[in-house]
């Protein structure tokens, strides 16, 4: 392998040429997941209210579906749902927002803050994910991501980012209106169906948010510095990557955000020599073929 790497062109231009070959398609899988998990979630509500299934079963189903609510929005934030087809750009916010209903989140707010995360990954002054990423463990990450709206330091960061970036400020304003609608909807639901709202919406949302804070933010970025090839790592917790939304290979996303989530394994296999040459954390120990767990041969 080392001899092969020595014979390869490992320049940045060569790296980008390989990466571009994985970009541009419509990520139909995320469209199906985004709309599908919402259909499952709303159907669960109907079946519980009508007494077709017990509330405890609805809680389990709702929690699982809600844990799949963010990733399609994330794909939409990066334009993966429309691919290179500009006339389909409307699909990104539409599917992204529908998918986020179980999480009661604004697609526009998450898009704006996530773009700042990519622009300033691991920067304590400018990365909105910093306060639940750079913590000591899973519990702190779970608590931190659920306290986002009540975090004074994060609010100050967002305010400063808005002062420097009018487009970011406008996105936060527009998205804030959607967040207010979710607050009202939650209040109405809680008054009308208190126990159902608790176990089908509020608690699944908290569990899913904790899960996302751990596997989507904390594990890929913890204790890492700023820098394109240094801010994200390969990692493993011993279970199949599909149960972690394949976040063990999230490093590929930060290397080239335009590559679709479901194309990342093949992209890593093609770009592995470049990742090792750039010194990406964990790349040297990653297998040549990405299977159920990227850090197991």
Image (cartoon, rainbow, N blue to C red):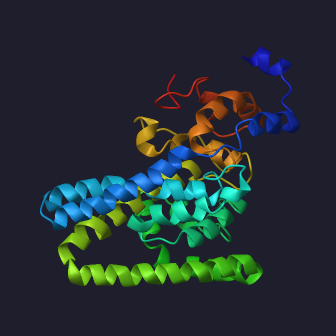
Q: 258 or 282: nearer the eye?
A: 258
* In the image: residue 182, left or right of residue 160: left
Please report the residue visible at 12 percent of the width from the left and 63 percent of the height from the top: 51
- The quadrant in which residue 121 appears is bottom right
Residue 258 at least partly seen: yes
* In the image: residue 162, left or right of residue 194: right
The answer to whether residue 296 is above or below residue 148 is: above
How many marks do you count on the picture?
0
Q: 116 or 235: nearer the eye?
A: 116
Q: 282 or 256: nearer the eye?
A: 256
The answer to whether residue 103 is above or below residue 287 is: below
Please report the residue visible at 54 percent of the width from the left and 81 percent of the height from the top: 176
Residue 68 at least partly seen: no
Residue positioned most to the front: 87
Q: Position of residue 68 (x, y in %)?
A: 42, 53
* In the image: residue 133, left or right of residue 244: right
The answer to whether residue 279 is above or below residue 62 is: above
Q: Position of residue 37 (x, y in %)?
A: 39, 54
Q: Position of residue 273 (x, y in %)?
A: 73, 28
* In the image: residue 120, left or right of residue 296: right
Please report the residue visible at 81 percent of the width from the left and 39 percent of the height from the top: 16
Quarter occupied by the N terminus:
top right
Q: Position of residue 258 (x, y in %)?
A: 69, 48
């Amino acid at each position: 392998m080392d001899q092969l790497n020595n014979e390869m062109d490992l320049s940045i231009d060569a790296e980008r040429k390989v990466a571009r070959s994985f970009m541009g398609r419509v990520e139909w899988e995320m469209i199906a997941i985004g709309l599908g998990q919402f259909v499952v979630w709303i159907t669960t509500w109907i079946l519980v209210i009508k007494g077709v299934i017990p509330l405890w079963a609805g809680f389990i189903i709702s929690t699982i579906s809600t844990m799949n609510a963010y990733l399609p929005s994330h794909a939409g934030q990066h334009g993966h749902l429309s691919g290179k087809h500009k006339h389909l750009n409307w699909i990104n916010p539409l599917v992204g927002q529908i998918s986020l209903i179980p999480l009661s989140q604004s697609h526009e707010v998450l898009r704006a803050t996530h773009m700042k995360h990519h622009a300033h990954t691991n920067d304590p002054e400018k990365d909105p994910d910093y306060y639940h990423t750079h913590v000591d463990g899973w519990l702190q990450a779970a608590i931190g991501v659920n306290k986002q709206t009540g975090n004074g330091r994060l609010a100050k960061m967002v305010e400063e980012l808005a002062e420097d970036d009018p487009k970011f400020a406008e996105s936060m304003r527009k998205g804030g209106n959607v967040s207010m609608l979710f607050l009202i909807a939650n209040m109405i639901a809680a008054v009308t169906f208190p126990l159902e709202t608790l176990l089908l919406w509020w608690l699944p949302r908290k569990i899913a948010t904790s899960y996302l804070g751990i596997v989507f933010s904390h594990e890929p970025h913890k204790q890492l510095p700023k820098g394109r090839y240094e801010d994200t790592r390969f990692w493993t917790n011993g279970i199949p990557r599909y149960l972690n939304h394949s976040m063990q290979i999230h490093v590929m996303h930060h290397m080239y955000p335009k590559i679709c989530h479901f194309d990342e394994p093949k992209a890593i296999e093609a770009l592995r020599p470049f990742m090792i040459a750039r010194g990406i954390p964990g790349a040297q120990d990653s297998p040549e073929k990405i299977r159920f767990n990227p850090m197991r041969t």
